[in-house]
Amino acid sequence: MSGTARDGTASGRDRDEEGRARSARPRDGLGRPLPYGAPGVERQPEGVVRAPEETVAEAQALLDAGKPFHAHEVFEDAWKSGPDEERALWRGLAQLAVGLTHSARGNARGGALLLRRGAGAVEEWGAESGRRRPYGVDLAGVGAWARRLAGVVERDGGAVDAGAWAPRLRGDGAGRAAARPGPR
């Protein structure tokens, strides 16, 4: 690739202060890049260390707002900064948020795969740790929600409404769409 990036590097890619590739393009609510100069959604700051309860509350608010990509970033921060024995929990929750992101983008195959992978990860972590509701998160309910959504995404093949399908992390996991009658 020839040319220079916006920061003057020869790679053709935007870079952060440490030289890591970082796209400066604005993004939409599902994390998709938009053209330079287009109005986008404010990005979730990376590398924020939060208490676990704050992580769950902030991720839930982002999920409810239809921003699962941003919720994934919050879970990823916990995964990277939390204690070793909880990393699989936070990674699994991040996978669930990415699965919802792909499902909302219309990527049925990737969405279903990540939803099931995340469900298995959080359920396995709960079984191995003996903690079924860490920080109030209903792991069994969230796992059931993810598997149900994976089935809907595979069956229907189209994009889902991320806000309508947001899981209830501290409830029964079901999400708002589970309460609606009719086909999905």
Image: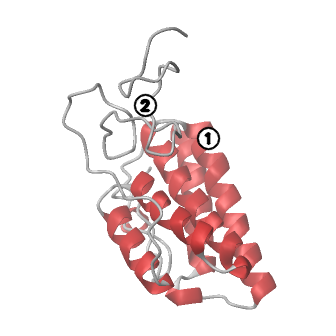
Report the residue at 53% width, 82% height from top: 137
Mark yes or no: residue 144 visible. Answer: no
Report the residue at 51% width, 58% height from top: 97
Report the residue at 66% width, 88% height from top: 132
Q: Name the quarter where the N terminus is drawn.
A: top right
Residue 86, compared with residue 16, is above or below; it is below
Residue 5, compared with residue 30, is above or below; it is above
Report the residue at 45% width, 68% height from top: 167
10 Å crowding of disc 2: few (<14), some (14-19), many (20+) = some
Mark 2, residue position: 14
Is label 1 in a helix, a strand or a loop? helix
**Which amino acid, by three-letter code, is at mark 2?**
Asp
Q: Position of residue 178 (x, y in %)?
A: 43, 66
Residue 75, compared with residue 26, is above or below; it is below
Residue 140, compared with residue 77, is above or below; it is below
Q: Position of residue 176 (x, y in %)?
A: 37, 67
Mark yes or no: residue 20 visible. Answer: yes
**Which amino acid, by three-letter code, is at mark 1?**
Gly
Is label 2 in a helix, a strand or a loop? loop
Q: Is residue 55 left or right of residue 138?
A: left
Q: Position of residue 133 (x, y in %)?
A: 59, 88
